Image: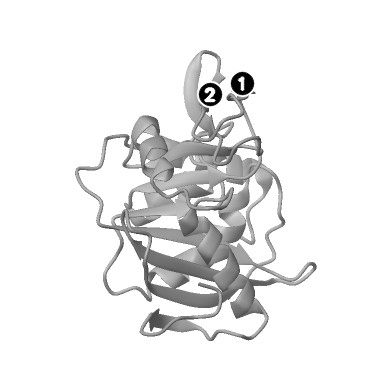
Amino acid sequence: MYDHFTFPEADALQIALSKQLIFKPLKSIHTIAGADISFDKGSSTMYAGIVILSFPEMVVQSYALETYETTFPYQPGYLGFKEVPALLKVWDLIPVKPDVVVLDGNGILHPRRMGVASHFGVLTNQPTIGCAKSILYGDNHLPEKSKFSTAEIKSHGEILGYALRTKDNNKPVYISAGHLITNEHALAVIKKCIGNYRIPEPTRLIHDIVNDFRTGKLKAGFHIKTQPLTLF
């Protein structure tokens, strides 16, 4: 899908897509999804997955898995070009779409306001949230060390997201609106997804699922969770 793109062409597409971004609070959320990719270093195969959970209970309802071949390189600021095509294949497998999707990466907390969560959100016309494990962009002010402490992340005075402490004294995660949600609402939603781990439940669970998919423990396709899986 994007393998032929040069980085200047990718920049231009990100800028064009950013003009389609819409930010508004979601009226209600009953289901929330986590989306992620796993891969073997040096391989062109992406192992992509999306897990759907009830909200706010965080009970797994179903998950979908698919592979995708790409040669687009991993490069900071261009994650969408590597991962979104694979996630779109998975998205097509899901018969009833979730209310919002959390992606392991950034939304508008990005130099061109087009992190992987915004990229996926615009192409699917889906509410999305970016939840990154490391800071990519913006002036980061660390939150206090207690759980649920937050700090604004700004660029040129504009709030692009929040650093959120999910456990006492742990490194924060970085939350930003992807598409069809506001930064403030994205932060409020993620706070309700925090369990016993640093990573919020939607992206924590899908990270484990796609790793099991990559190693052959799970199969491609759409799966309704009818019995416990060892990773849950």
Question: What amino acid is labelled 1 in the image?
Answer: His
Do the CB atoms of the residues marked 1 and 2 lie less than 8 Å apart? Answer: yes
Query: Nearer the N terminus, badge 1 or badge 2?
Result: 1
Q: Position of residue 135 (x, y in %)?
A: 65, 35
Q: Position of residue 210 (x, y in %)?
A: 58, 71
Towards the viewer: 173 or 136? 173
Q: Position of residue 90 (x, y in %)?
A: 45, 71
Residue 1: tell me if it is visible: no
From what the image shows, is residue 59 above or below residue 152? Answer: below
Residue under the image location 59 percent in, 68 percent down: 208
Residue under the image location 61 percent in, 58 percent down: 82
Circle 2 SS class: strand
Question: What amino acid is labelled 2 in the image?
Answer: Ala
Q: Position of residue 149 (x, y in %)?
A: 51, 28
Circle 1 SS class: loop
Q: Is residue 122 left or right of residue 25?
A: right
